Image (cartoon, grey):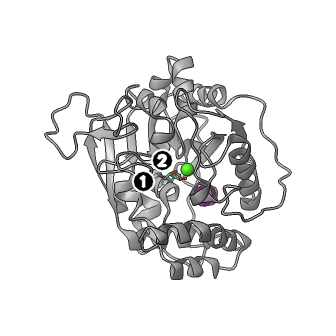
Amino acid sequence: MSDRLEKRKIPRSSGSYRVEEDSFYDNCFDGYSLPVWFDCDTGVDDAIALLLLHQLECFNLLGISTVAGNVVLEKTSYNTLCVLELAGSDVPVYRGADRPLIRDQITAPEVHGTNGLGDVILPRPSLDLEKESAWDALHQAALDYKGELVLIAVGPLTNIGLALAKYRDLPRLLKRAVIMGGGARGGNTTPAAEFNVFADPEAAEILFSSGIPVTMCGLDMTMKACLTSEELEELGSLGSPQAEFARDCLQNTLRYSRSLGQPGVALHDPAAVLFAADDSIFESYPAWVRVETKGKRSYGKTVTDLFSDKKMPDRNHRVVIDVDRDKFKARLLYLMGRYGK
Ligand code: BDR
Ligand code: CA
């Protein structure tokens, strides 16, 4: 472990919600904080993921990069700064790509609202974006923490594709990537494709074929990491401005999800963050994964051998297919309950 890694004890008992199993914090890397880079397209569930990251002391969050996705880059960057300020964080934020590598840009205002935060308006932040680009800053952090940096990416993978194209040494500098994206069984933007991968399939394919071990927190699992309307009220009743914001910004997505017959709102990006912190409440398996970039109807599908013959060479990725929803909810409420204490 690098000398620069800070040894930190992880607090166990603050906040009104206690996680049921003691192993949650024990599993967080034996009391060491893990160097982490977060790439996001903030977005309502990205916003909740940012709030959780700030409370996860098992992580040493080195930097955050923004990318166009749920809304345009200007908004995802602005939203990221707003949410960080709300969290009380001053982690540096780097502007990334404003469009996908090859395909036409798509956004999802029907899910995230016109402003990307469910049309909740946060105060204008005093924080500002760094001058360096997302891909240069990510590469520098990977150099600084050679072989130890974990990338968590919860938006379209354009920044990562660009970083990998520019820096050929990046795959051996990163420990692994945990992404919210894809799905072994199906999609949410097309029948085949999940939003983050569909928004930039070529970039996602670059990551999956780069040699970096990728954990795919896709729709198979994240659709189960959901909160009902009553549970959102429970979240808001924690009473802090952060918890009330979380409840309020998810209302638009809740309405959208219900219009599709879903029982609640799926917290895709928070689920990926909690997986990276401790995988013990999740079910995942090794697999080969690649992205379809040619198919007329299958464009953006993450193709995996997990449910077939498991015979592809190079089965160095992981596909997460399930989560214990009650424990997911308990952890989310526990971490959000730490605000205002
Ligand atoms: C993913 O796409 C975005 O809408 C969310 O922020 C999440 O990262 C879900 O498909
Ligand atoms: Ca996202």
Is there CB contact under 8 Å for labels 2 and 1?
yes
* Residue pictured at 39% horizontal, 50% vertical: 218
- Residue 39 image offset from top left, x and y in percent: 58, 42
Of 196 and 284, nearer the camera is 196
- Residue 200 image offset from top left, x and y in percent: 50, 35
Q: CA distance from mark 2 to mark 1?
A: 6 Å
* Residue pictured at 39% horizontal, 70% vertical: 325
- Residue 202 image offset from top left, x and y in percent: 46, 29
- Residue 153 image offset from top left, x and y in percent: 52, 43
Residue 303 horizontal side relative to residue 129, left or right: left
Q: Main secondary structure of the magenta part?
A: helix
Say which residue label 2 marks.
195
- First in sequence: mark 2 or mark 1? 1
Q: Secondary structure at mark 1?
A: loop
| Amino acid found under the numbered disc labelled 1 | Asn
Residue 159 horizontal side relative to residue 176, left or right: right
* Residue pictured at 32% horizontal, 46% vertical: 319
Q: Quadrant of residue 312?
A: top left
Q: Which mark is residue 250?
A: none
On whether ligand 1 comes within 8 Å of the CB at mark 2, the answer is yes
Q: Is residue 187 above or below residue 168?
A: below
Say which residue label 1 marks.
188
Q: Quadrant of residue 295?
A: top left
